[in-house]
Amino acid sequence: MSIRCTVESAFFIAWSCLEQSGELGPPDESANVLLDAIEAQLRTGERRQLMLANRAIDAYRVHAAERRSTADREARVG
């Protein structure tokens, strides 16, 4: 399987999971976070679709938690 197919499949798996769980945020931002996480893993040699997808989901959840934390701080200060 080509790298392109691997990336597309991993992205689709991660996107679908987050969408079904209601966790998916703004589409552009969400796509960028997922693709950045997948790309970082590819650079380390990871090629397993499910591993790429699961780690991208984890990275997205960390990103979303940080975004919520920042928004909460700004609401308290503002």
Image (cartoon, grey):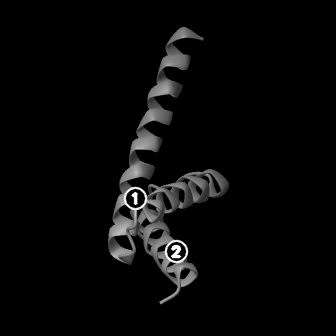
Question: Residue 50, relative to residue 78: is it above or below?
Answer: below
* Disc 1 secondary structure class: helix
Q: Earlier in the sequence, mark 2 or mark 1?
A: 2
* Farthest top residue in view: 77
Q: Is residue 17 left or right of residue 78?
A: left
Foreground label between 2 and 1: 2
Q: Mark 1 belongs to which amino acid?
A: Ile
Residue at numbered disc 1: 57
Residue at numbered disc 2: 7
At x 40%, y 58%, the residue is 57
Between 49 and 60, the one nearer to me in the picture: 49
| Residue 28, picture quadrant | bottom right
* Disc 2 secondary structure class: helix
At x 36%, y 59%, the residue is 55
Question: Residue 43, relative to residue 50: is it above or below?
Answer: above
Question: Residue 13, relative to residue 71: is it above or below?
Answer: below
User: How far separated are the C-alphas under marks 2 and 1?
Assistant: 14 Å
Q: Residues within 10 Å of mark 1 (few under 14, many from 20)?
A: many
At x 48%, y 18%, the residue is 73
Q: In the rendered structure, find residue 74 and report the number of the disc placed on it.
A: none
Q: Mark 2 belongs to which amino acid?
A: Val
In x, y percent, where is residue 36? 54, 55
